[in-house]
Image (tube, helix red, strand yellow):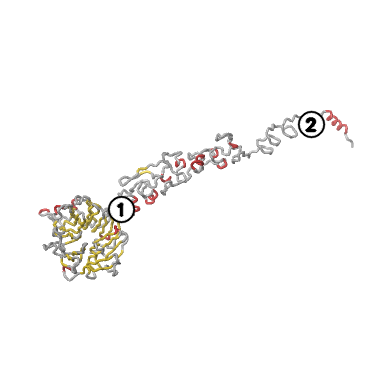
Amino acid sequence: MRIKLPILLLALSACKDDPGVDTDTDPVVDTDTDTDTDTDTDTDTDTDTDSDADTDADADTDADTDTDVNSDTDGDGILDVDEAAGDTDGDGTPDVEDTDDDGDGVLTADEGGLNQDTDGNGTPDYLDADDDGDGIPTLDEVTTWTTNPFDPDTDGDGLSDGVETSVSGDADPTTSTDPLDADTDGDGLSDGDEDADGDGAWTATIGDSDTDGTGESDPNALDTDGDGLSDGDEITAGTSPVDTDTDNGDVDDYTEVIDRLTDPLDPFDDHWLVYSHPCVGSRTDTMWVEDAGQTVWVGCGTTTNPEGLKVSIDGGLTWSDATTSPANFLTTWRVNDLFRAADGLLYVAGNDTQGSGRVISLDTANGGAIGEVFTAGNFTWNSFTVGTFRKTPAGDMAAESLNGYDVIYKAAGTADWVDAGDWENGNGSYQTLDMEIFGEDFYGVGSTISQPPVVQLPPVGGRTGFEMVGVEMSPPGLFAFDGELWDVHVDADGVIAVGVNQESNAAVAYVSVDGSDMYDYSTWNFFQADSLIPGDPTWFRGSCRAGSRIIAVGEYSQTQDSLMMVSDDGGLTWAEEFFPPGTTAVQVCKGEADGTIRFAGADGFYGVYLP
């Protein structure tokens, strides 16, 4: 094998003759000029101006050898390459180094990243000064209102935070609601429900018994219309929170819903509580009311089934047989009259259908102990069924016959009843259909179908035993008429007597005038129902006074529908009032000073009129 050594030696000899240029510190002679500032062994093809130790020019600050696209200089979750090339909030710190790019008080890292746009306005939250678009700058939500900057309705009540704080969109900036409380006024309705149009302004007209309320309830008022019911309670009851009397029935919503338990949407029942008592028949003969109406006694009288005495201790809502000792003593009685005397006993009059009892006393404070008062005798004058019984404070007692002229009397401290039928000072007497006492005096009314109507008054000089004076109430001559007076009411304001003009088939009422001569019929105020309702036969059966109002009740004779007339000027003028629909004939009324009136009538009707 031959080796070509001369050629190799020639090459080495050539290198030795050209030492070359070496400007850096490596052991190799350069063929170029190494002008970079790094420590590599050859001249770079780029200009490396960064301060890291890699071998090329980077756009990042790490030690790798390429540009880093995942860099996040400020650690806010938004990559540097995605952050705006500037200073969004103008605070002097570029966004790539600013942890709160928009300066809204919420760190960029907490604003949901690159794509979260709460209000959908096209600007991501981290660059949006009002993230939720409620009109309140996010910075103010965080520092001032403590509302949720990512929820335009922090409390979820249907009103935006801007409207609630009056910062934005509030038509009435003078008022505001609590953006952290869905029910600012605590009335049970959300602020949004009350401010239905969401404009921040309360607009309404408050109604009353004459006008209807309109508009919204006030989210800053517990009771917008001021009727005593909160706005929430009104919605529950179905009433209007902007109308004090939703049904325009004359009684405010609170009174109906809370006090009376009437229907606040039915104008007719604003003044009425209607119940039923168990003495069902064509009439109610007697009723006694006490304890401000909580205790009501009703007698099952001439036409009823069953018989006996019934009592309600809850104002007429429920009824039961009266407690007696002996038990069930009155279950066979037809009770025509009730009277609580000054001695505290309740006197029950009528007749025992299974015996001869006519009047008994009932000690309601002592277990219903029964006391005998009057038992039918063997003569006409003392064997009748009792229509009315009265006992004066001094103890004088009288009872009149339900169907005849007879009257019996028993003076206080005496043992026997006496015949008092000839009660007008020996001049004869009239039939008595009702009797009353005032002080120690007896009053009555009566007559028959063939006689003039008569009011029976105490003698002018005082009575001796049982005495009254009959005053015929029909004018003499051409205008005279026959009639019956069925009820008398006596109090400190005078006497009321009601009944019927038999000739004209019209109800009549007489009212004594204070200071006048009661013994002169022409001084009384007189009313005949056909002056208001001509052509309809009518009859008054009962009367009472409630405050300054006089009431007469009865029926339309042909239809047996209920009839009520009232006078507010002492019987001078009258007007018709109406019972609840469907009420038939009414015979009894009891009035109170506050204007409350209680009624009883046919078919077990018991009603309370509330002023």
Task: Give coordinates of residue 552: x percent, y percent.
Answer: 22, 55
Res 47 visible: yes
Question: How far is the residue under mark 1 from the one under mark 2?
Answer: 120 Å
**Residue sticking out furthest to the left:** 477
Kindly state the secondary structure of the residue where label 2 is placed. loop
Q: Which residue is mark 1?
A: 269
**Residue sticking out furthest to the right:** 1
- The kind of residue on which mark 2 rests is Val
**Residue sticking out furthest to the top:** 17
Left or right, 186 with respect to 520, comes to right
Between 243 and 291, the residue placed more toward the observer is 291
Between 126 and 326, the residue placed more toward the observer is 326
Q: Is residue 505 above or below residue 185?
A: below
- The kind of residue on which mark 1 rests is Asp
Task: Give coordinates of residue 48: x percent, y percent.
Answer: 69, 33
The count of marks equals: 2
Snapshot quadrant of residue 166: top left
> Earlier along the polypeptide chain: callout 1 or callout 2?
2
Task: Give coordinates of residue 37: x percent, y percent.
Answer: 72, 32
- Crowd rating for badge 2 (residues with CA inside 10 Å; few <14, some 14–19, many 20+): few
Q: Is residue 185 above or below residue 21?
A: below
Q: Which residue is mark 2?
A: 29
